[in-house]
Image (tube, rainbow, N blue to C red):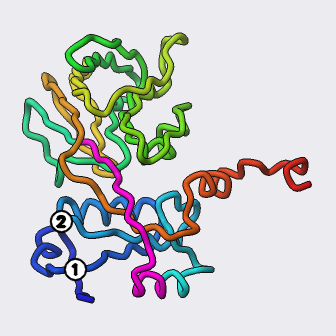
């Protein structure tokens, strides 16, 4: 097994072949590691030393047996879909893909955005509010969930549009096909808005058009036999914590 130190995607690519990349921390650290791996097709194993840890298969209590299973080849790989971003204007971003979500927000707390959205070339809505989240199934348990979005199983071929503090009561999160291109145009009073790909954030000056599609490559996540998405949801979100379920 090859081991080594790296600080960016290019340095990691020069270390090839690499069997695994291990991420020690929470979900944020895991996402940062996914950005380093990018299209290198290296399996990523998350070791949770943070709080919730939806994306991490290993924790403080089971890391030794999990590492033994890893070395013995007793694991499975789950492919996580990504979002790909293209812009009509150059953006100061380190990468143009996101594992969790792409978020458009107001850059001024005293104003709201009018976010025009087309899916598959067809107009969907103009979202008036603080912003809009475009989330993958992986990102459905992150920012999107806190804004009222649905939980989506990791292998579903869909994305979700989740408004942030919508100024229209009738607007609700919408699940769409991941095969459809999403086109976005933002209008705001101060002629700029905040754009985030996962934790990477920039302020974008209008006029600009954003196009979001499914990324060509995926992130390979290492899982073990006892790693089950529904079990993770029950444990992390405390689903089923009802004394009637303990009988």
Give how far apart the Cα atoms at labels 2 and 1 are.
9 Å
Coordinates of residue 146 in the picture (x, y in percent)? 55, 39
The number of numbered badges drawn on the structure is: 2
Q: Nearer the viewer, residue 201 or 36?
A: 36
Q: Is residue 77 above or below residue 144?
A: below
Judge whether residue 229 is colored magenta.
no
Coordinates of residue 240 in the picture (x, y in percent)? 76, 48
Residue ID at (42%, 20%)? 129
Marking on residue 18: 1
Q: Quadrant of the N terminus?
A: bottom left
Q: Earlier in the sequence, mark 2 or mark 1?
A: 1
**Residues drawn in magenta:** 67-83
Q: Quadrant of residue 231?
A: bottom right
Q: Quadrant of the C terminus?
A: bottom right
Q: Is residue 9 visible?
A: yes
Looking at the image, residue 121 sits to the left or right of residue 143; the answer is left
Question: Quick one: label 1, few (<14), some, or many (20+) residues within 10 Å?
Answer: some
Residue ID at (38%, 41%)? 136
Marking on residue 40: 2
Q: Nearer the viewer, residue 200 or 123?
A: 123
Look at the numbered disc 2 and give the secondary structure of its residue.
Answer: helix
CB within 8 Å, label 2 to label 1: yes
């Amino acid at each position: 097994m090859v081991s080594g130190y790296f600080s960016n995607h290019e340095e990691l690519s020069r270390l090839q072949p690499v069997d695994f990349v291990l991420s020690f921390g929470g979900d944020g650290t895991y996402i940062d590691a996914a950005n380093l791996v990018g299209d290198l097709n290296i399996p990523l194993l998350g070791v949770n030393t943070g709080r919730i840890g939806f994306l991490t298969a290993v924790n403080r209590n089971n890391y030794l047996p999990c590492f033994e299973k890893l070395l013995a080849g007793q694991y499975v790989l789950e492919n996580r879909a990504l979002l790909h971003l293209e812009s009509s204007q150059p953006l100061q971003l380190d990468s143009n893909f996101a594992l969790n979500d792409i978020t458009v927000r107001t850059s001024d707390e005293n104003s709201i955005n009018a976010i025009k959205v087309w899916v598959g070339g067809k107009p969907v809505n103009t979202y008036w509010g603080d912003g809009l989240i475009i989330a993958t199934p992986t990102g459905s348990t992150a920012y999107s969930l806190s804004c009222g979005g649905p939980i989506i199983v990791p292998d579903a071929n869909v994305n979700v549009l989740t408004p942030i503090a919508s100024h229209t009561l009738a607007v609700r999160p919408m699940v769409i096909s991941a095969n459809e291109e999403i086109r976005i145009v933002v209008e705001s009073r101060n002629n700029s808005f905040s754009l985030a790909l996962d934790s990477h954030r920039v302020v974008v000056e209008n006029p600009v058009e954003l196009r979001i599609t499914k990324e060509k490559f995926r992130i390979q996540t290492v899982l073990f036999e006892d790693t089950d998405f529904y079990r993770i949801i029950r444990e992390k979100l405390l689903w089923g914590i009802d004394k009637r379920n303990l009988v």
